[in-house]
Image: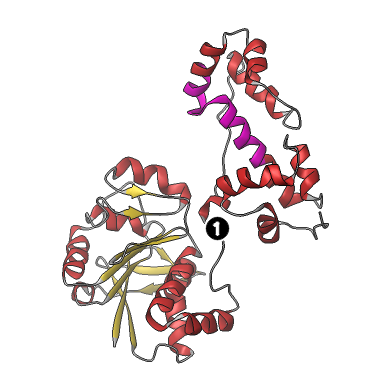
Amino acid sequence: MKRLVVVIFDGASLGAMSFAFGVFDMASQFGELPGLEIRVVGGEPDAALRGGGLTVPVPEDLDAIRDADLVLVPNWRSPSQDPPEEALEALRTAHARGARVAGLCSGAFVLAAAGLLDGRPATTHWAMAPLLAARFPAVRLDASVLYIDDGDILTAGGGASGMDLGLHLIRSWCGAEVANRLAKGMVVPPHRPGGQAQYIESPMPEPDEDDPVSETMTWALTRLDTALPVDELARRALMSRRNYDRRFREITGAAPGLWLTHQRVIRARQLLESTCLPVDEIARHCGFSSAAALRPHFRRQVGVTPMAYRETFGVLEPMLS
C-alpha cells in the first residue's frame, strides 16, 4: 500500500490538477497500481478546487499529509506570498518521516518556503523561475528541464510536466513496462525528449531608440541571414569595440557574439514552427552555413534537434531536407 496525498490550496484549477495526479488516478483505474491510496486534502481551511463553473470543497486534513508516503503539491496561488505555516510544518514532518515530497509548477514555491529545497536541485515553470531564484537563492534552480528527481525531493515544471513526473515515478515503482503500457492507454508519450528549454520564450528587451547599441541590435535582427561581425556593429554605433562590448553586456547580460547566436536560433525556431522550408534552407536564413552548423547551437539552446522541434511544434507538413 502506498499513500499518495495531493495537497490543494484554495483556488486551485481543476484542469491543472488533472496533470498533477491524473496519471496516478488512471493507473489505479487501469489496475496498474492496485495498492495505491489517493487522497486529496486541503493545505488550509476552506480550500476548494475551481473550474468550468464548478467549485469542489476540499477538507483540510494535515494529519494525512504527515502520514503520507508521497506528497504532491501541485500549485500555490501566489508565488510572491508565503504559504500557511501549518501546511509547511506538515510537509516538513512528512519529509522527516521518510515521505517523498514533490512540488509541481508553482508548488515548488511551497517546498522552497518549507526549506525542503535548500541546497537541492529543483525546477519550476520556466516563467516563474526568476521569481523563485530571487526569493529562494539557496535553491539550485534549473528551469530548462521537465522534472528533477533528487530522491526524496522531486520537482516538475509547468502543466504536463506533472504528468511526465508521474510516469517517471510509476516507472521507478513498477518498471518501464508498466509505465509504457499506462502511457499507451492514456495516448501520451512515456518520455518526452528535451526539456522546458524548448518552451521558453525569449523576449527582446524594449529598445531605446536613443541608445546606439540598442539601435544596432534592432538593425542586426533584420540581417540575421548575413555575417554580422561584432566589429561592424561597434563601428555602426560609433563606439570602440571595448566600450561596445561593455554597453552590450549592460543591456543584455551577454556578449554580442553569444546574443547573435541566440537570436539566430530563435529565428530558426520561428521558421521551423511556421514554414515548410527544409532545415538547410532555414539554417541559411538564420546565418548558419548548413543544417549541420545550426544543429549543435540549436540543441544546446533548445534541448532537442531542429527536426525534433519541428515534429513537436510545426503546424505544417515539413518538406524533407
Report the number of numbered marks. 1
Tell whether 311 sits left or right of 106. Answer: right
Rendering coords of residue 231 (x, y %): 64, 16
Tell whether 124 sits left or right of 65. Answer: right
- Main secondary structure found in the magenta portion: helix
In this rendering, the answer to whether 284 lies above or below 254 is below
Rendering coords of residue 127 (x, y %): 47, 47
Residue at image x 47%, y 66%? Answer: 16
The residue that disc 1 covers is 194
Rendering coords of residue 60 (x, y %): 25, 72
Tell whether 118 sits left or right of 97. Answer: right
Tell whether 256 sits left or right of 277. Answer: left
Magenta stretch encompasses residue 249: yes
Rendering coords of residue 217 (x, y %): 63, 24
Q: Farthest residue toward the front? A: 292
Q: Quadrant of the C terminus?
A: bottom right
Give the amino acid at mark 1: Gly
Residue sitting nearer the eye, 110 or 120 = 120
Q: Which residues are magenta?
A: 247-266
Q: Is residue 199 visible?
A: no
Magenta stretch encompasses residue 213: no
In this rendering, the answer to whether 312 lies above or below 134 is below
Q: Quadrant of the N terminus?
A: bottom left
